[in-house]
Image (cartoon, grey):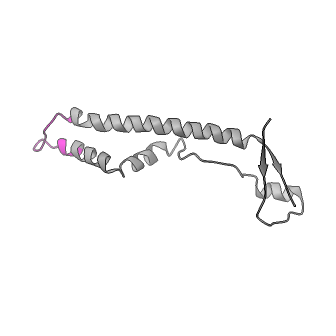
Amino acid sequence: NKWRIVFPSNGRQWNNWKQASMFYSANRIQTTKYTWFTFLPQFLFEQFHRLGNLYFFFLVVLNWFPQVEVFHREITMLPLIVVLLASMIKDAIEDYRKYQFDKTINLSKTRVYDK
């Protein structure tokens, strides 16, 4: 039975509670980075901004050309896939924990102090 205490500092004076509740009806805390639809594209976009991942991706693309192929194609893809998979699992777990924490905060009771 923990209460979250909110102190409004916007300076607005509301005539009635209905007007205030309509204005702030979607007011909630959201610290998650991803949604179900944006997880994969946004994750890949962030990962390929890192120089190391770009380097390994360049090696994978380079090995698909038979003239410059040094290793087997699958062996070249293995380090990149392992690093991306480990980062994906870590980011998914972190984001899910943030989602759970946000959900508990958003469903907690609040007490609002007004002047």
Side of 25 relative to 14 (left or right): left
Q: Is residue 12 magenta?
A: no
Image-based side of 78 in relation to 32, left or right? left
Quadrant where the C terminus is found in the figure: bottom right
Magenta-tinted stretch: 61-73
Taking depth in this image into account, of 42 and 96 the one nearest to the observer is 96
The quarter holding residue 113 reads: bottom right
| Viewer-side residue, 80 vs 111 | 111
Q: Position of residue 56 (x, y in %)?
A: 26, 44
- Counting from the top left corner in percent of width and height, residue 58 is at 24, 47
The secondary structure that dominates the magenta segment is loop
Q: Residue at x 31, y 45 (%)?
A: 53
Residue at point 30%, 47% (across, down)? 52
Residue 74 percent across, percent down from the top left: 23, 33
Residue ID at (40%, 46%)? 44
Q: Residue at x 70, y 49 (%)?
A: 28
Question: Was residue 62 drawn as part of the magenta stretch in this picture?
Answer: yes
